[in-house]
């Protein structure tokens, strides 16, 4: 049996102490991050002091270890290699009984290794690091040699790190990234001005820094007007605005690096979910945010330090479940849900003078406003006078012809409370009645009067403007969506519709008491 010890670069002290607890959504008063208390993060030293032979731009080194198919032990950074096991290793290592790649070994040597916490058996998460390109593995340098140079932090770490050391995937990722920069005109995006309606009504903003000097971005969910935005601007404008925000954040990281004399490359995001409601689950806007998070994962890897959720409502598990497929496991591990003591927990991460008074700190605008409106936009309802369209084009999944004097029922079985029914429909030939009912007898068709009325039946001008809505199911059972044309004795109606059942995230169910009512 041979032993291999090596050192990996890491982004910050916070990343070094992240645990592997899969319950990434933590109850409020605990204030934990991936199984580690926030207070432990703040009390831990920023890094272990090491003497190293790598060049100054390389980040702090720490001792850790991992290898596919081998047991990983926390402490001295040793990996037990059995037999003739051979395969790719992080940052250029290929190992046969402990051999090293000399081309990259110098970047990981230390004459004073970081001290471990003992010989435990806890498996560590795969660390993410940043290396100057001169210390990239040879295959990574070759993969990007044909690409246009860029100073973007995306290329400040070996590309294979972000794709589990798969060279082909890494090269494809980089080529796709360069195409993204060209399509979005990233090199000039900071000179681009978003439409007026976005500047006035799109919530969010940069304000202050955490205790490590990392910028803090706030997203204010409640005042967001989803329909107003998509009726007033294009989806491309919204996405480009979000990419512009990303570049603003990275530019601020560069400025902080110059001010502090040390590398700042990650940010803290705070999502204020007060007011999160059914209006935010309108399908077109959900699809925009899903695409946005997908772009973040593909083009801005390793920039998120933490995503802190405060004032989460009971609908948050549903919203999280909609976005989760578009978030990497690494990103999901950095999401923290804070409960009733969220102000105290924020102060452990952010100094009072850097935290707006509205969020528990002492920072205010020059005029004393505690919300810091000069830095954070709180959005609001968009006036209809700014609309450029009255509907968003939608593809419907089903279509049915409803005869005069009749109705059509669609049944959906809800297995547990907290699910959300979401619908969109369009009628042709006149208005149509619509209501939602809960069946009282299983296995047979019931008339409207025999069922429990959940959403009273009303007539909608869906032939003029498509109708959409949603409903939180308070109890399990079979829900019936009923399209009613019984009042029409002359005209048949064609109805096109889409219905979805949105499930809350299972990991959030046990934290129900921590979430505020909608």
Image (tube, grey):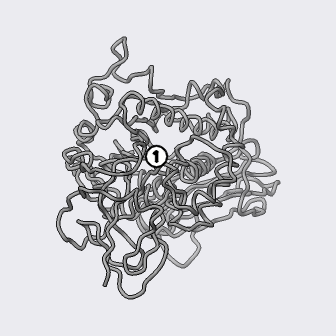
Q: Where residue 244 appears, x then y in whole percent? A: 59, 35
Quadrant where the N terminus is found in the figure: bottom left
Q: Image quarter for residue 234?
A: top right
Q: Nearer the viewer, residue 2 or 393?
A: 2
| Residue toward you, 472 or 251 | 251
Q: Is the C terminus in the top left, top right, bottom left or bottom right quadrant?
A: top left
Where residue 375 appears, x then y in whole percent?
44, 24
Please determine whether, in this image, residue 35 is positioned above or below residue 70.
above
| Residue to which mark 1 is pinned | 303
Q: Which residue appears at 63% of the width and 38% of the height?
A: 238
The residue sitting at 30% across, 53% down in the picture is 33
Q: Quadrant of residue 347?
A: top left
Residue nearest the observer in this picture, 6 or 511: 6
Image position of 488 with respect to 218: above or below:
below
Q: Position of residue 202 (x, y in %)?
A: 55, 31
- Mark 1 element type: loop
Residue extending farthest to the bottom is 83
Q: Indicate left or right for 255 with 281 as reference.
A: left
Quadrant for residue 4, please give it. Answer: bottom left
Residue 375 visible to an observer of this rendering? yes
């Amino acid at each position: 049996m041979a032993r291999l010890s090596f050192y990996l670069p890491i982004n910050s002290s916070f990343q070094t102490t992240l645990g592997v607890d899969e319950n990434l959504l933590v109850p409020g008063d605990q204030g934990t991050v991936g199984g580690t208390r926030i207070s432990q993060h703040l009390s831990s030293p920023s890094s272990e002091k090491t003497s190293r032979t790598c060049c100054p731009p390389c980040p702090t080194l720490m001792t850790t270890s991992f290898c596919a198919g081998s047991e990983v032990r926390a402490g001295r950074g040793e990996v037990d290699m059995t037999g003739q096991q051979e395969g790719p290793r992080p940052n250029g290592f290929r190992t046969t009984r402990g051999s090293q790649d000399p081309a990259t070994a110098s970047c990981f040597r230390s004459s004073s290794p970081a001290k471990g916490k003992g010989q435990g058996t806890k498996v560590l998460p795969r660390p993410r690091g940043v290396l100057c390109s001169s210390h990239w593995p040879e295959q990574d340098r070759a993969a990007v040699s044909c690409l246009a140079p860029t100073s973007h932090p995306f290329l400040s770490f070996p590309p294979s790190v972000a794709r589990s050391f798969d060279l082909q995937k890494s090269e494809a990722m980089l080529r796709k990234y360069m195409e993204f920069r060209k399509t979005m005109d990233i090199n000039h995006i900071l000179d681009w001005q978003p439409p007026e309606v976005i500047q006035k009504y799109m919530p969010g903003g940069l304000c202050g820094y955490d205790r490590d000097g990392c910028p803090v971005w706030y997203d204010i969910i409640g005042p967001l007007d989803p329909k107003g935005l998509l009726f007033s601007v294009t989806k491309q404008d919204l996405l480009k605005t979000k990419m512009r925000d990303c570049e603003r954040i990275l530019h601020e990281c560069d400025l902080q690096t110059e001010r502090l004399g040390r590398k700042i490359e990650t940010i803290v995001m705070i999502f204020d979910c007060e007011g999160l409601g059914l209006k935010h689950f309108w399908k077109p806007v959900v699809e925009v945010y899903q695409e946005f998070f997908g772009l973040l994962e593909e083009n801005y890897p390793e920039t998120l330090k933490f995503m802190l959720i405060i004032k989460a409502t009971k609908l948050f598990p549903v919203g999280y479940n909609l976005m989760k497929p578009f978030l990497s496991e690494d990103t999901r591990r950095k999401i923290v849900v804070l409960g009733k003591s969220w102000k105290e927990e924020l102060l452990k991460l952010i100094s009072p003078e850097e935290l707006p008074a509205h969020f528990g700190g002492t920072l205010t605008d020059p005029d004393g406003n505690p919300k810091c409106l000069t830095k954070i936009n709180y959005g609001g309802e968009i006036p209809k006078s700014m609309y450029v369209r009255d509907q968003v084009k939608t593809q419907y999944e089903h279509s049915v012809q409803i005869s005069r004097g009749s109705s059509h029922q669609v049944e959906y079985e809800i297995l547990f409370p907290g699910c959300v029914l979401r619908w969109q429909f369009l009628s042709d030939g006149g208005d149509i009645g619509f209501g939602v009912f809960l069946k009282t007898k299983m296995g047979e068709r019931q008339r409207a009067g025999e069922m429990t009325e959940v959403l009273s039946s009303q007539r909608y001008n869906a032939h003029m403007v498509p109708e959409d809505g949603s409903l939180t199911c308070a109890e399990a059972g079979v829900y019936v969506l009923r399209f009613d044309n019984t009042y029409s004795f002359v005209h048949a109606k064609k109805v096109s519709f889409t219905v979805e059942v949105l499930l809350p995230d299972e990991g959030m169910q046990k934290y129900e008491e921590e979430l505020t009512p909608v």
